[in-house]
Image (tube, rainbow, N blue to C red):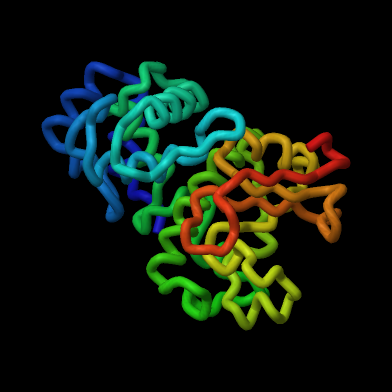
């Protein structure tokens, strides 16, 4: 469900008029919050708690080149740097502090189920072409969905960097049965909800792979890697503590200079 008209009007005010945004957010944050999550305070280095964790999920796609944003509920230098990049990308005041304008932009991007505007759970649950729920993998359905949500916010950041043009998810979460059916690796990141295979009508596969390096993806495989001439695989293996793979960064797309 998309955000309602009232929310959009108040978010627009928050983004356009900084002084008015402070009064609006402090006095009545629920006026524009959707069904997902509402921040109750300004967050800055030194802050901690679930509200920081919720912020980290949404800026997970804005780390530096080859870096990630750890979802640990602690507002340290890594989180502040990601917030600054998020602010810069969306034309906000760049100060590394998550306040009214930053939250207003997140609300504008966020749907009531916490997914970013341009991606959905149904889109990521299609490893074999049909959505079959989030069970059947090595993790609980809830844990798999949580991983997929973080992945979607990274995809939203990548989409924005690519000019806000559509990115198509060819394959997302796969159950163990689905993974066997398509011949996936025995410990594929797709099993955990941490991977997606991408293509786009407006961006080359090489452009997708190259830009993905700065949006929190520790696994990238594209043109030049066997069986990846028609899509780019991106994943978050460095953050996956449940798999059998080392928490490291592995990129391979030789035809793209990666």
Q: Would residue 77 be visible to someone looking at this image?
A: yes
Q: For the point 38% across and 40% down, which residue is it?
A: 56
Q: For the point 51% across and 33% down, which residue is it?
A: 62
Q: Position of residue 91 (x, y in %)?
A: 47, 21
Work out whether residue 33 or residue 251 is closer to the camera in this orientation and state it.
Answer: 251
Q: Position of residue 47 (x, y in %)?
A: 23, 31
Work out whether residue 244 or residue 228 is closer to the camera in this orientation and state it.
Answer: 244
**Extreme residue in the left direction:** 27
Q: Would residue 123 be visible to someone looking at this image?
A: no
Q: For the point 11% across and 32% down, which residue is it?
A: 27
User: Within the image, what quadrant is residue 160 found in?
Assistant: top right
| Vertical position of residue 66 compared to residue 248: above or below | above
User: Within the image, what quadrant is residue 187 found in?
Assistant: bottom right
| Vertical position of residue 102 compared to residue 248: above or below | above
Instruction: Give the quarter of the figure containing the C terminus.
Output: top right
Q: Position of residue 135 (x, y in %)?
A: 47, 78
Judged left or right of residue 28, residue 128 is: right
| Vertical position of residue 230 compared to residue 110: above or below | below
User: Within the image, what quadrant is residue 206 found in?
Assistant: top right
Q: Position of residue 64 (x, y in %)?
A: 55, 28
Instruction: Give the quarter of the figure containing the N terminus.
Output: bottom left
Judged left or right of residue 173, residue 5 is: left
Work out whether residue 155 or residue 11 is closer to the camera in this orientation and state it.
Answer: 155
């Amino acid at each position: 469900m998309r955000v309602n008209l009232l929310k959009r009007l108040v978010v627009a005010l928050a983004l356009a008029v900084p002084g008015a945004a402070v009064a609006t957010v402090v006095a009545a944050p629920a006026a524009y919050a959707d069904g997902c999550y509402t921040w109750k305070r300004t967050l800055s280095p030194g802050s901690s708690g679930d509200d920081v964790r919720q912020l980290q999920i949404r800026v997970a796609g804005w780390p530096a080149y080859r870096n990630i944003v750890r979802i640990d509920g602690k507002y340290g230098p890594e989180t502040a740097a990601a917030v600054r990049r998020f602010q810069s990308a969306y034309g906000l005041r760049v100060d590394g502090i998550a306040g009214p304008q930053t939250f207003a932009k997140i609300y504008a991007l966020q749907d009531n189920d916490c997914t970013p505007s341009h991606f959905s759970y149904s889109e990521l649950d299609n490893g074999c072409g049909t959505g079959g729920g989030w069970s059947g993998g090595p993790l609980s359905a809830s844990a798999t969905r949580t991983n997929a949500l973080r992945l979607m916010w990274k995809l939203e950041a990548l989409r924005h960097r690519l000019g806000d043009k559509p990115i198509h998810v060819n394959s997302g979460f796969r159950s163990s049965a689905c993974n066997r059916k398509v011949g996936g690796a025995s410990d594929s990141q797709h099993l955990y909800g941490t991977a997606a295979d991408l293509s786009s009508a407006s961006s080359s596969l090489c452009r997708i792979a190259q830009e993905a390096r700065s949006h929190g993806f520790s696994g990238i495989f594209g043109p030049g890697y066997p069986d990846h001439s028609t899509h780019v695989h991106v994943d978050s293996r460095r953050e996956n503590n449940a798999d059998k793979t080392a928490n490291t960064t592995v990129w391979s797309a030789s035809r793209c200079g990666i």
